[in-house]
Image: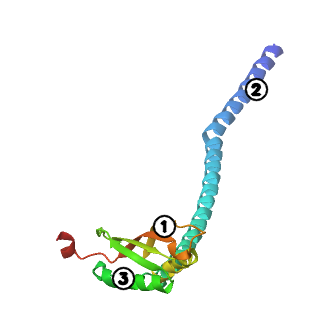
């Protein structure tokens, strides 16, 4: 008889241990595991927030540097801004260019202007100059042309001649664009 009593007490002990293990597993799943997951998520969010704060600091620094550079470039642009003349002063421009050519000891045979193309920021005036002169003076002209007339661009250069012939027989043809001040709305419609 003592055996069945001990055996029944053993089953009670085993059942008690099983209930404790089951309660521990349920307690871990219900209480501890969600707490650990929330804690891990909070740590991940904190790391992500620190990374983003560092990125914001870097971007703020880069933005400040870019704004300083933009301001410096704007000041440089204002200091070196080319003041465009009106296309109505074409005769004065051609006279000044012809004088510049003669100072370079080049002879101008013909000057032609094309149709003015109106734009919002500038008017574009094509100018073709044909003349004669030694090659070194043509090179000198091209070097000084950009300094003297920064509102012009060279579209095409044709130089022809023979090294064995006198320097006066060398010919040049320059096709230029003059960037003039934009015409007013009244001039554009007419």
Task: Name which of mark 3 and mark 2 comes first in the sequence.
Answer: 2
- Disc 3/disc 2 C-alpha distance (Å): 114 Å
Foreground of the two, 163 or 149: 163
- Provide residue 153's location: percent of width, then percent of height: 45, 71
- Disc 1/disc 2 C-alpha distance (Å): 108 Å
Residue plotted at (53% across, 67% down):
161
Q: Secondary structure at mark 1?
A: strand
Q: Residue furthest front?
A: 165
Q: Is residue 3 above or below residue 142?
A: above
Task: Name which of mark 3 and mark 1 comes first in the sequence.
Answer: 3
- Provide residue 19's location: percent of width, then percent of height: 68, 29
- Provide residue 189's location: percent of width, then percent of height: 18, 70
Residue plotted at (62% across, 57% down):
46
- In the rendered structure, find residue 77 and report the number of the disc placed on it: none
Residue plotted at (40% across, 85% down):
96
Foreground of the two, 156 or 171: 171
Residue 37, image quadrant: top right
Instruction: Count residues near mark 3 (Cα–Cα under 10 Å), then give few for <14, some for 14-19, many for 20+.
Output: some
- Provide residue 169's location: percent of width, then percent of height: 51, 72
Foreground of the two, 67 or 181: 181
Locate the N terminus by quadrant. top right
Instruction: Count residues near mark 2 (Cα–Cα under 10 Å), then give few for <14, some for 14-19, many for 20+.
Output: few
Task: Single out the mark in the foreground, 1 or 2.
Answer: 1
Give the labeled residue for mark 1: 157
In the image, 158: left or right of 11?
Answer: left
In the image, 151: left or right of 29?
Answer: left
Task: Name which of mark 1 and mark 2 comes first in the sequence.
Answer: 2
Give the labeled residue for mark 2: 13
CB-based contact (under 8 Å), mark 3 and mark 1:
no
Residue 50, image quadrant: bottom right
Give the labeled residue for mark 3: 93
- Disc 3/disc 1 C-alpha distance (Å): 19 Å
């Amino acid at each position: 008889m003592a055996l069945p009593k001990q055996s029944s007490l053993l089953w009670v002990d085993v059942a008690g241990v099983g209930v404790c293990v089951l309660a521990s597993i349920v307690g871990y799943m219900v209480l501890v595991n969600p707490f650990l997951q929330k804690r891990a998520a909070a740590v991940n969010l904190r790391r992500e927030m620190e990374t983003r704060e560092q990125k914001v600091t870097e971007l703020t620094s880069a933005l400040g540097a870019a704004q300083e550079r933009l301001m410096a470039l704007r000041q440089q642009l204002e200091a070196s801004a080319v003041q465009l003349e009106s296309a109505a002063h074409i005769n004065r421009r051609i006279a000044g260019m012809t004088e510049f050519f003669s100072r370079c000891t080049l002879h101008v045979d013909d000057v032609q202007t094309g149709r003015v193309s109106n734009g919002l920021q500038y008017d574009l005036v094509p100018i073709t100059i044909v003349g004669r002169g030694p090659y070194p003076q043509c090179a000198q002209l091209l070097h000084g042309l950009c300094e003297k007339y920064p509102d012009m661009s060279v579209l095409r250069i044709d130089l022809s001649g023979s090294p064995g012939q006198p320097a006066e027989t060398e010919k040049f043809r320059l096709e230029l664009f003059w960037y003039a001040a934009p015409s007013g709305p009244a001039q554009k419609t007419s």
